Image (cartoon, rainbow, N blue to C red):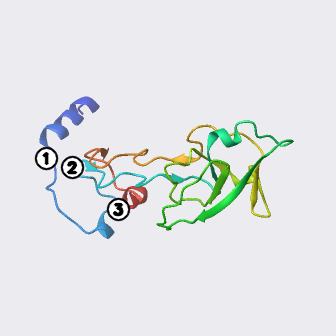
Amino acid sequence: MISYEEALSLILSNAQPLGVEEVPLSALLGRALARPLAAAADMPAFDNSAVDGFGVKLADVERASESSPARLELSGTIQAGDRGALSIAPGNTLKILTGAVVPADVEAVVMREFCQEQDGLVLVKRPAKPGENIRRRGEEFKAGEQILPTGTRVSPPVVGL
């Protein structure tokens, strides 16, 4: 009988990689990637909101609290999939739903749980931090960046990616 190390060495010295073949996405499960996978595009593809909330300028909410909320005028709503180019002026806010585009002049998105809509106004009951609840373009990965190495076993999350 030979040792484990000898058996492994014998197997590895005689093993040869299988050839590369292209198969449809539906047939990938359980296989291994023959080459590294690079991102086709930035992810996320644009700045978007991580929550349902209200886009604000930091100066407008810097002193906001439960007992003394900032009172901002609601100037519009951005839903996921909207392509409109809305912006906010000081003293205003935009309702921004999860996944929706965040305009460049919005400095943070305050979760709706910390706000109250009232007669065209939004009462913001806490201050915000720069970039809060905003997923920035390319934050997860950038186009061309390697996201999976050669040999990665293809599982359902890999197929989804």
Residue in the picture at 65% in, 54% down? 93
Residue in the picture at 13% in, 47% down? 16
Q: Quadrant of the N terminus?
A: top left
Q: Amino acid at mark 2?
A: Arg
Query: Tag 1's secondary structure?
Result: loop
The residue tagged 1 is: 16
Question: In front: 3, or 116?
Answer: 116
Q: Kindly identify which numbered label has been placed on residue 29.
A: 3
**Residues at marks 1 and 2, CA–CA distance in whole angstroms:** 16 Å
Q: Amino acid at mark 1?
A: Gln
Nearer the N terminus, badge 1 or badge 2?
A: 1
Frontmost of labels 2 and 3 is 2
Frontmost of labels 1 and 2 is 2
Nearer the N terminus, badge 2 or badge 3?
A: 3
Q: Position of residue 42 (x, y in %)?
A: 36, 51
Specify the quadrant of the image occupied by residue 6. top left
Q: Looking at the picture, does residue 21 appear above or below residue 105?
A: below
The residue tagged 2 is: 35
Q: Looking at the picture, does residue 25 appear above or below residue 38?
A: below
Nearer the N terminus, badge 1 or badge 3?
A: 1
Residue in the picture at 17% in, 36% down? 10
